[in-house]
Image (tube, rainbow, N blue to C red):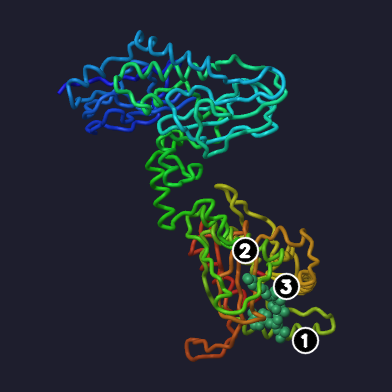
């Protein structure tokens, strides 16, 4: 068994290319023609195949290394001594030159540009060496575009290399004769240009270069296959990061082929390789995720109903269930109103983005309710009715002042403490949920708050609230007290960090230390952003609120 140094073959005009992927490791058994590494210039990416079969004994290149023709890639313990002698030798330049000559000459005879410098000009696929039936994977121009000589028109790809096909003429693109998914061969009509300003020499540089390099590389290995030839066709420009073709995902030709075979949209795969390069493992992981339902392709997400949103796919959620409800009984479909759609989107974001926790508690409002009723009696003539919510607003301001983080907002890694107390209240309207804001509640009495709340609630129901009346809240209260229920978990109104939910008060037997006594208990549900507030602080906030509500004189303290 002989040790064979596998070298980088003739890679044409490229002096130095970067190793961007190692496809084998020490101990691997490789076949002849198996890709060993992927290298990349600013215009092309290609896989370097092994010139011999055997076991990899030593890797001589690492990721990021620069290599050129003759650089040793790795050392293989060759399977057969015969192979080693033939394959260890680098590309012989004399042989290459000899072989290159006739091939490079070929395109000269081929009519790459089949028209004069005026009128329509047909652009054909130039000599692309041994490439047969290469797939068009990208179309880079569209009819109406002004095309320069040598401007890339399409990208084609074999299983080992990808390259851009440039225009041999300048002019306005009249017709493009190929589309993504077509396969092309030398001499196929690619495009028709009009108003031609310049026509390139009959043999475009690329055609000559490709042909030459295919010929050169085919020289050293006696049994050179089209695959190996293609791999070495590095003169062919291909998409590369940082190049003008940045729209294409960054992956080697074999990974592209692999993705195509599986039907994986490569532009949706996140690359884990160097510079975000997509590896075969990435494609496999993506496929697994989609098959298990843990992820969706964009195409799948687009087919899902709007209510699920494509964000679900972005979050790796399974698709929204699609049910034909009409199968089970009569149905009627109605579009949601504008306000419901807007508030729905906000609620969804807040529910997903805020690590929210809800604490439930009860406040004894027996005395406060008696006071509220007597106040309303006294103020009957004023037309202003005081509800529990107005007292709650006042009580919350006192609690917010004692626990200022509840009146703050997150700004990156900082907390913004607000020295004003504008309280929002959820209002149920025929059009959906709205949150009017009462400003400077710390400076207003319960009567004034009640009056403003009545006016704002009416405006909300009439759909007459202005934007200024719905912005600037520092804390929100959502009261279902007039309707019913015991507790609920309100969603924080970002960028606020807490919200108080209130339900219907009920008479309950409460143990006073000696006996059960009937007390009017108000259920409170405080939802808070755990990034800003700790559970202990939330419990203290609720307890303090309960103390104030049970003895409202504390508001004055
Ligand atoms: N416990 C017991 N009774 C209560 C109460 C409570 N916590 N809160 C209010 N009530 C009583 C009121 O005293 C009033 O009784 P009377 O008619 O006998 O006087 C009745 O319930 C109706 O009150 P109200 O709802 O008109 O007034 P309010 O100040 O409590 O609420 C407003 C005003 C605008 C907040 C309310 O009308 C509303 O829209 N609530 C719904 C809010 C909402 O939808 N929240 C959910 C958001 S999350 O989807």
Q: Is mark 2 on a helix, strand or loop?
A: helix
Task: Specify few, some or many for label 2: CA neighbours under 10 Å numbering under 14, 14-19, or 20 or more.
Answer: some
Q: Which residue lies furthest to the right in this view?
A: 381
Quadrant (top left, top right, bottom left, bottom right) of the N terminus: top left
Please name the residue that numbered disc 2 is placed on: 400
- Residue at 54% over, 52% down: 299
| Distance (Cα) linking label 2 and label 1 | 30 Å
Q: Is mark 1 on a helix, strand or loop?
A: helix
Q: Is mark 3 on a helix, strand or loop?
A: strand
Q: Is residue 425 visible?
A: no
- Residue at 53% over, 23% down: 126
Quadrant (top left, top right, bottom left, bottom right) of the C terminus: bottom right
- Residue at 18% over, 27% down: 79
Closer to the observer: label 3 or label 1?
Answer: 3
**What percent of the width, then of the height, locates residue 519?**
57, 87
Please name the residue that numbered disc 1 is placed on: 377
Of residues 321 and 327, the one nearer the viewer is: 327
Task: Specify few, some or many for label 3: CA neighbours under 10 Å numbering under 14, 14-19, or 20 or more.
Answer: some
Q: Is residue 407 toward the left or the right of residue 510 in the image?
A: right
Please name the residue that numbered disc 3 is placed on: 429
Q: In this view, does 351 lie above or below 163?
A: below
| Distance (Cα) linking label 3 and label 1 | 28 Å
Q: Can residue 129 be seen in this view?
A: yes
Could you say which disc has been placed on residue 450 in the image? none
């Amino acid at each position: 068994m002989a040790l064979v140094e596998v070298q980088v073959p003739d890679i044409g005009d490229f002096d130095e290319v970067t190793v961007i992927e190692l496809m084998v490791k020490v101990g691997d058994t490789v076949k002849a023609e198996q890709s060993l590494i992927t290298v990349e210039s600013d215009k092309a990416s290609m896989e370097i195949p092994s010139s011999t079969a055997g076991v990899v004994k030593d890797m001589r290149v690492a990721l990021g290394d620069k290599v050129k023709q003759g650089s040793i890639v790795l050392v293989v313990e060759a399977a057969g001594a015969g192979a080693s002698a033939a394959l260890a030798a680098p590309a012989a330049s004399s042989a290459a030159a000899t072989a290159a000559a006739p091939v490079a000459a070929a395109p000269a005879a081929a009519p790459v540009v089949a028209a004069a410098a005026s009128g329509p000009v047909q652009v054909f696929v130039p000599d692309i060496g041994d490439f047969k039936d290469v797939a068009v994977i990208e179309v880079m121009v569209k009819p109406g575009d002004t095309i320069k000589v040598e401007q890339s028109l399409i990208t084609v790809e074999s299983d080992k290399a990808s390259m851009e096909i440039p225009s041999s003429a300048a002019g306005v693109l009249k017709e493009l004769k190929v589309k993504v998914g077509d396969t092309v061969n030398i001499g196929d009509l690619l495009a028709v240009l009009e108003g031609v300003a310049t026509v390139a020499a009959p043999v475009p540089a690329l055609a000559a270069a490709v042909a030459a390099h295919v010929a050169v590389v085919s020289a050293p290995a006696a049994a050179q296959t089209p695959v190996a030839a293609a791999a070495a066709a590095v003169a062919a420009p291909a998409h590369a990061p940082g190049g003008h073709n940045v729209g294409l995902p960054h992956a080697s030709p074999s990974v592209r082929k692999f993705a195509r075979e599986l039907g994986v949209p490569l532009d949706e795969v996140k690359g884990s390789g160097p510079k975000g390069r997509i590896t075969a493992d990435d494609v496999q992981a993506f496929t697994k995720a989609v098959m298990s339902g843990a992820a969706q392709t964009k195409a799948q997400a687009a087919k899902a109903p709007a209510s699920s949103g494509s964000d679900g796919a972005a979050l790796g959620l399974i698709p929204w269930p699609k049910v034909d409800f009409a199968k089970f009984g009569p149905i009627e479909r109605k579009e949601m109103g504008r306000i419901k759609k807007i508030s729905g989107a906000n609620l969804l974001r807040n529910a997903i983005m805020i690590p929210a926790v809800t604490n439930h508690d009860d406040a004894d409002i027996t005395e406060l309710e008696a006071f509220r009723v007597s106040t309303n009696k006294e103020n009957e003539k004023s037309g202003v009715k005081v509800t529990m919510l107005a007292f709650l607003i006042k009580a919350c301001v006192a609690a917010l002042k004692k626990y200022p983080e509840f009146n703050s907002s997150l700004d990156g890694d900082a907390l913004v403490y607000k020295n004003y107390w504008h309280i929002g209240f959820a209002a149920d309207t025929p059009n959906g949920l709205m949150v009017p804001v009462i400003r400077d509640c710390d400076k207003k009495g319960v009567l004034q708050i009640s009056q403003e709340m009545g006016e704002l609630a009416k405006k909300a129901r009439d759909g007459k609230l202005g934007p200024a009346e719905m912005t600037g809240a520092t804390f929100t209260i959502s009261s279902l007290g007039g309707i019913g229920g015991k507790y609920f978990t309100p969603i924080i109104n970002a960028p606020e960090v807490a919200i108080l939910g209130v339900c219907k008060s009920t008479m309950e037997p409460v143990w006073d230390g000696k006996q059960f006594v009937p007390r009017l208990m108000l259920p409170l549900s405080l939802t808070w952003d755990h990034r800003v507030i700790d559970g202990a602080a939330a419990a203290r906030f609720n307890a303090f609120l309960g103390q104030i509500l049970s003895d409202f004189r504390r508001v004055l303290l």
